[in-house]
Image (spheres, rainbow, N blue to C red):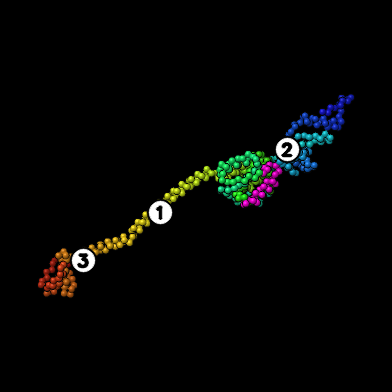
Amino acid sequence: MVSPRENDGALPRFSVAELNGAIANLLDRGFAPRFLLEATVSRPQLKKGHLWLTLTDGEASIQAVVWASQLQRLRFIPEEGDGVVVVGRLNLWVARASLSVQVLDIRPSLGAVLRQFERVRTLLEPEGLFAPERKRPLPPFPSRIALLTGAPSSALADMLRTARERWPATRLLVVPIPVQGSVEERIVQAIERIGSRAASLGLDALVLARGGGSREDLAVFDGERLARSLAACPVPVVCGLGHEDDTTIADLVADYRAATPTAAVVALLPDREATLSALRQGRWHLRQRLQLRLEAERRRLVEGRRQLQQWHPLRLLQQRRDWLSQQRRLLEALSPTHVLARGFALLRDGKGQIVRGVGSLGPDDTIRVDLIDGTVDARVTAIHPTSAPPVAPP
């Protein structure tokens, strides 16, 4: 600690170095050791491995620096005009009394993230990348899917567990990717690499997932290049990013947006219990239909057998025989011989015509009498008409 020197006027006396040192001590003791600072980045420059930038809010500005050792740990590297939230502490360069903010961590601010989202959405929407008609249907029973997510991570563990429980027959290809910070290029490379080999790998779908985090943490999924790589992917894409209320550009481009990584797997893989129940129900319906069909065929065969029996030649011959026998009996019943056997006689005149009444005969006419056992020739000696009207012949 630098102590001021006393003089005759009782005022403290400093050298420039002592004054600057005293100010540095006051800052160290009287100001928060760490703080959050919301600002906009201006004029970022990389010098000797350190990142120098100006932080401003439009009314005031302050210099800031990210030392090289810290720069390697950052997940987000700001560019000109980016809105950021800085975790920092004050740093006073004693030699020049130059005050700056030493950046310990830096993240995009929510406002900047939303502006970036709107910028990319406005750019891509007219091209039809978000249109519902370009969304591809998900495969009903995928044989293999690729999971692009951070590894190891709780999101990956949940997805693997859910996949085992729902449909263990599907093979999973885990592709570890960074999911936060300025890593869009690495994610795009992973998607394009998997897409180019989708056919040879036998992939049916791709899942892009990241669990939890703030909306600022999901800013990497708002990139234009990432959106175009997802749109060009040869297999359907399912996105499960962040929480249910979070919507990124990647979600809008994807063929299916799931609320969470686990929901992405649920949407893509069938439920084996539900599928097994449906198969059992289908088997029962199939048996019912088969039994009904067999019963209908059995009835058809019985009817066919009955018809065959009805139209069998022997049966038809017997029916014809029965009909002829009936006709013979009818003829016998109507035959004159049958009448003669009952004691009647049949009279014929000299011309052989049947005598139907006395009006056709006269005295001394010769007639022939047909009896059951022969004929008799006779002569009419007398005619005795009756008073009853003649009966018309049949």
Please tell me how many numbered marks the rendered image carries. Answer: 3
* Mark closest to the chain's N terminus, 2 or 3: 2
Q: CA distance from mark 2 to mark 1?
A: 80 Å
Q: Residue at x 60, y 49 (%)?
A: 204
Q: CA distance from mark 2 to mark 3?
A: 132 Å
Secondary-structure class at tag 1: helix
* Mark closest to the chain's N terminus, 2 or 1: 2
Q: CA distance from mark 3 to mark 1?
A: 53 Å
**Amino acid type, mark 3:** Ser
Q: Nearer the viewer, residue 60 or 228?
A: 228
- Residue matched to label 2: 105
**Amino acid type, mark 2:** Asp
Q: Nearer the viewer, residue 201 or 105?
A: 201
- Magenta segment: does it hold 262? no
Q: Nearer the viewer, mark 2 or mark 1?
A: 1
- Is the magenta region chiefly helix, strand or loop? helix
Q: Nearer the viewer, residue 229 or 194?
A: 194
Question: In the drawing, what numbered circle is on residue 218?
Answer: none
- Contact? badges 2 and 3 (CB < 8 Å): no
- Residue matched to label 3: 335
| Quadrant, the C terminus | bottom left
| Image coords of residue 393 (percent x, y) | 20, 67
Whether residue 129 is visible here, answered yes or no, is no
Whether residue 172 is visible here, answered yes or no, is yes
- Residue matched to label 1: 297
Q: Tell me which segment is drawn in magenta.
A: 177-200
Label 1 neighbour load within 10 Å: few <14, some 14-19, many 20+ = few
| Image coords of residue 353 (percent x, y) | 18, 72
* Mark closest to the chain's N terminus, 3 or 1: 1
The correct choice, above or below, for 391 with respect to 9 in the image is: below
